[in-house]
Structure formats: structure tokens, C-alpha cells
Amino acid sequence: MATLLAACSSSPGSAGGTASPSSPGSPGSGTSSGVASSVTPSSPASATPSEPSTVPAGPALVPPTASVLINADGHLRLVHADGTEGRIAVPSIDAEGTHDEVVIGDWAPDGGRISFTRLNHTVQPVQASVWVANSDGSGARQVVSCAAPCQRAGLGAWSPKGDQLAYVVTDFDAARKVAVRTAVEVVTLASGKRRVVLETKDPLVDYAFPRWSPDGTRLVLQVLHVSLKTPAGSSDPVATPTVAIVDLGRPPTQTPRVLAPTLPGTYPDWSWKSDTILFATNDPDAVSTEDVDRDVWTVRPDGSGLHQVTRLPKPKLAIHPSWTADGTIAFLECVSRSICYLAYAKADGSVVQTPLKLRGFWPRVKPVA
């Protein structure tokens, strides 16, 4: 199942406040058999949305002028952490004969470059490829291509030295409409050489969102197991996500070591400052069930120290968490599935700050000033 190709697909809505310069309308979600239709959940919660819960406690957790990569309207945007000075860094293209969408950016460790996933909606099933660019969006170039049977090469993450990217690949059998291979690969940017570090041919297992350990020897990632059985009254299969660790020194056939096995962990990140792993529970793109907790947690790489950071009342949800270089958490506080605001929190959850109601998805704060 190339579930998380579409975890990249479709525009999550426009950034709010001053972070949203006028831009072309967002492309529609690309739906194909065996692929989830959208990263942005399409059905809002039934309750009436309310404003996010802002706790203006003390100085800003993230410097107001720090640069943040965030997705909105299908474009990759740069915006100040306080929600000002927003502009498009890498635009999507929606013109006759061409429909490309840019999603899920990441900063190189020195802040001088960015990576992103480009979705080609012109072909079906939708194909994804990995790109890098300068920090201002200029000089974009493809570093991992994707041609049939490849359907997805994306969700890239920079290595601690900035010389490699880890990403996920899915090969798809169009005739049978099923994924035949899902793998995590690493590309060396100077040479373009690719190597497989984790691989499965089970169509009911999906890998997504790899992130590097501080020493560059391991990856944490989301592993999704899909059941063919559907619950009564539902047409959707049951999906069970977990957060797990892969050792880059072991064979690609290894079984990822699960962290926090009692929690449906999604969208992990690994702090290079505190060596702590961050994740959200029940991300709507992995778990469609409505009445579940969607909060941010942390855990040590050995599975100890499990800690709940946010405790949002339903139907609110916390998704897409990421670490800043100094150990602050950036995440999205959503008042419904489709209305999400950039927020910041201390790692212990004692302070949560939401600046200027800035809307968007997949936020990442620039690691250096």
C-alpha cells in the first residue's frame, strides 16, 4: 500500500495571517487505487471548530524571525515563526498539460538547502520524486527520480552531515493495483548513489517519514500495517501505525524495532540535541477512526521515558510534530481535521504557544539563524 504517497498528496489549505500571499488555487487531491487520496483529511470533525488554545507564557519559544518551512495551497512556503513575511519558496505548477505539487520540506543541517517531494499529477497513478534546492527555493534539482514501476520516491530527510537524504520508495503494479515493494533508501548527494536500508514486498506494510539519529547510524520511521478485514459498518480497512527504529548497519530485511508498542505512533522526528524521539498518535492520514486521541508524545530511543506532551480535548488534534535545533517542538494544533494552526511547545508540554493563527501543514523550523 502506497498509503503515504498520498500522505503527500493534495493541498492542506491556505496559510493564514500574513503568511499567505496570493497564489494559484490549490490543486485537487490525486486519488488512485491502492493510494490514500489526501494527506489533508477531507472530512472535518462534526463539532463546531473553535479557536486554538494559545498559552502566551513568557518569551517566544521560537525566535519571531526564525524561518519556518510550511506547506499551504500545495506550495512550499517560507514564513517567520511569528507568522509574518510569508512567501512561496517552491511553487506548485498547475497549467495546461502539467500538474505538479510540492509538499513536505526539510532543512539541511546548516540551513543552506532544503529538500522536498514533488508530486506529478499529470500521470496516473500519481508519481512522487525527491528534490533539493537552495534555502530560498532557487536552484531546484531532482536527486531521486521515479518512473514505473516506481510510484513514490519521497518524504526525504537530511542526514546529520548534510551529505545524504533518506527517503521512501514504493513500486506499484498498475495492472493488479497493488504495491509490490516498499523500501527506505539513502542517496549520497555528491554521487547520486542509492542504497536500500529497509525493504518489504508485503503489500499490507507501508513505510513513511524516515528521520535520522544524531550519529547517523539509525533511522526512526512510521510503519503502517493494514488489515484486509474491515470493521462492521465501514468500508475502510483497519490500519495500525507504529514508530520504529532501523539500524543502518543491519541488512534491509531486518524487522524495525518498535517503540511505544501500545501507542499508534505516526510522523516521528529525532532530536539531535536531546536524542529523544517525538511522534504524534493516530494521524488522520494513517488512522481514519474519529473517536481517538491525537496528541504529541516523546520517547527515548530505547523505548523508555514515554511522555505525553499535549492533551487536547476532542475534536482537537495535534499532528505533524518536529523538533527545532534547540529542543522546542513545532506542531500543528487543529480545531478540525482541515483547520490547523502552527504551534510551539516545550518538550515537557508546560508551555504551548500559537502565533497569529498561522495555518499550514508539515512545519519545520530552520536549524540556524
Image (cartoon, rainbow, N blue to C red):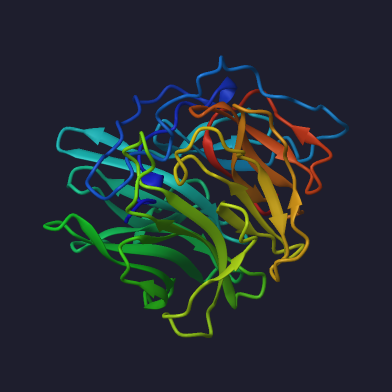
Location of residue 135 in the rendering, given as x and y in whole percent from the top left corner: 53, 50
Location of residue 366 in the rendering, given as x and y in whole percent from the top left corner: 63, 49
Image quadrant assignment for residue 132: bottom left
Query: Could you say which is closer to the camera, residue 45 or residue 367?
Result: 45
Residue placed farthest to the front in the image? Answer: 232
**Residue at x 44%, y 54% (from the top left corner):** 133
Image quadrant assignment for residue 262: bottom right
Asked if residue 149 lies left or right of residue 295, the reply is left
Query: Could you say which is closer to the camera, residue 234 or residue 354?
Result: 234
How many discs appear? Answer: 0
Query: Could you say which is closer to the camera, residue 217 or residue 111?
Result: 217
The image shows residue 115, relative to residue 60, as above or below, that is below
Asked if residue 119 lies left or right of residue 139, the reply is left
The image shows residue 293, relative to residue 73, as above or below, that is below
**Residue at x 78%, y 61% (from the top left corner):** 305
Asked if residue 197 lies left or right of residue 64, the reply is left
Query: Could you say which is closer to the camera, residue 278 or residue 354?
Result: 278
**Residue at x 73%, y 64% (from the top left corner):** 300
**Res. 188 visible in picture:** no
**Residue at x 34%, y 24% (from the top left corner):** 25
Location of residue 233 in the rendering, given as x and y in whole percent from the top left corner: 36, 33
Image quadrant assignment for residue 18: top right
